[in-house]
Amino acid sequence: MSGTRTGRTPTGRAGTALRSCRQTAERAPRQGPDPASDQAPGQAPGQAPGQAPDRSPDPAPRRASHGTPPQPSVTTPRQPTFPHDSTLRAALAAATDDRIIYDLDGIEAQYAALLRELPGVGVRFALKACPVDEVLACLAQLGAGCDAASPHEIEQALRAGVPIGRIHYGNTVKSDRNIAEAYRLGVRDFATDSLADVAAIAVHAPGSRVFCRLATSGEGALWGLSRKFGCSPEDAVLILEAARTAGLTPAGLSVHVGSQQMTSEAWQSALELLAAVVGTLNRRGILLDHVNLGGGLPALGVLDKRGRPLDPPVDKMFAVIREGVQRLREVSSSPLDFLLEPGRHLVADHGAIRAHVARLTARREPSGEDRHWLYLSCGKFNGLYEMDELQYRLEFPTHAAARPSGTPGATVPAVVAGPTCDSDDAYAHEDGLVRVPAAAASGDPVWIFSCGAYATAYMTQGFNGFQPLPYTCVRAGAASPGGSS
């Protein structure tokens, strides 16, 4: 499900609308499922068998000379470990130039762990989180599909081996040309959140299936995603009724609780909202066949803006999702399948960047405070796009004293920043500094962890002349160089 993370989480809830739908969420008499058909839902008449959608099951030293200004916190974060950390570390140690490295074994293990937590829930990988062919191919081989946000993403997923029936167009924002091109490529499942979009789908993708995205508050997430996408429960009913009238199949509902969601309560609220709307739709004679729970499952190895480890309650999140899925099955008058659109949860902690020190400097600021700055070869515009809302774990392999177990005397508190001539290319230094080696010199390697999500995707094509990082995909005992992202 598409979402551009544009700012801080807004507040407020759609409480009135939710209560209104809850009043009509009593379970309607269950109807038997439609007989199985050889023709895939939404398949255009006369469509060649080879083009039919494959709908197989889905297997976070200072001196003040003019008064004492407030002192930012300085942290030396803990270093979490992951089962496949050794593979990444070996590849980082072997790298002789700057690049991003993806551990395919780690990504596959994360996918398997997700399926164990949520059995029977299909996965549509949020392609935007990591548009790397090798990553898409390994997930496709395990049975994952793709949440695509444009015809180009659909084409990439197909090239990587994802069956067309496991690709949906998850962006509610699309032009007539986008819709027609996706339909030509074979996509028959479209996200929507407006009557205008439904009308366009009916014209340019006749007979297709639509699922309506409900707006959520986004509370509890680093990026709420609650302004640009999604509609009210009342609008959802009108939209799916209009889809039915226009000859489309009103197939499902979807939500997105916000990117890097940090609470289980967000999932609880979203699932309650879904149950209410499913009940209302059933009473209107609209029987859905699936619910898309969207993205939002967090990464575990990132730090907040002050350098403190983020510790999302993932076990509780999974328990809430399992309970919510069961409740939806009880409420629905028709059998429901369930999908998730994880992105960062699958790839963030299994990607790392080998960068290098550009320069460690010290200069006095207008406040009279001496401040160290560590400039890296990699920053916001070539691999670390999310550094405005979080910190990445850094390791300096040639400076043992700078590791978390090292002695504080060997480090200095510094603002970490990227190499470009742009002031946004830096950690949010008002909130926290990072301890870095006092002896760090230009050219020293730096390892940056848990940056496998939204790294290649957000790299600019040479902003200020700093080129996108090349990437390498590795497995235990093997590496395959990839291209430039």
Image (tube, rainbow, N blue to C red):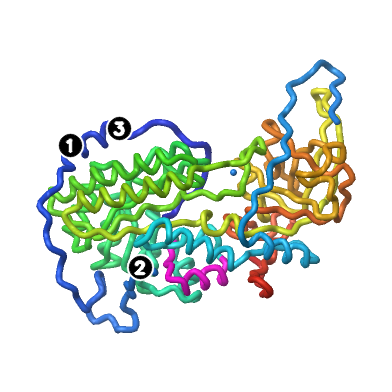
The span picked out in magenta is 132-148
* Location of residue 200 (image quadrant): bottom left
Q: Looking at the figure, which quarter contains the N terminus?
A: bottom left
Where does label 1 land, which residue?
23
Tell me if residue 63 comes above or below residue 112 in the rendering.
above
Where does label 2 land, which residue?
180
- What amino acid type is highlighted by mark number 2? Ala
* Location of residue 76 (image quadrant): top right
Residue 413 image position (x, y, % from top left): 79, 36
* Location of residue 406 (image quadrant): top right
Kindly tell me whether residue 53 is visible in this rendering. Answer: yes
Q: Earlier in the sequence, mark 3 or mark 2?
A: 3
Q: CA distance from mark 1 to mark 3?
A: 12 Å
Name the mark nearer the viewer: 3 or 2: 3
Report the front residue among 172 and 11. Answer: 11
Do the residues under discs 1 and 3 have CB atoms within 8 angstroms? Answer: no
Residue 362 image position (x, y, % from top left): 86, 36
Answer few, some or many: residues within 10 Å of disc 3's Cα (few below 14, many 20 plus, some between 14 and 19).
few
Going 47% across and 74% down the picture, which residue do you hit?
Answer: 141
Q: Earlier in the sequence, mark 1 or mark 2?
A: 1
- What amino acid type is highlighted by mark number 1? Gln
Kindly tell me whether residue 175 is visible in this rendering. Answer: no
- What amino acid type is highlighted by mark number 3? Gly
Residue 463 image position (x, y, % from top left): 69, 55
Where does label 3 land, which residue?
15
**Would residue 142 be counted in the magenta stretch?**
yes
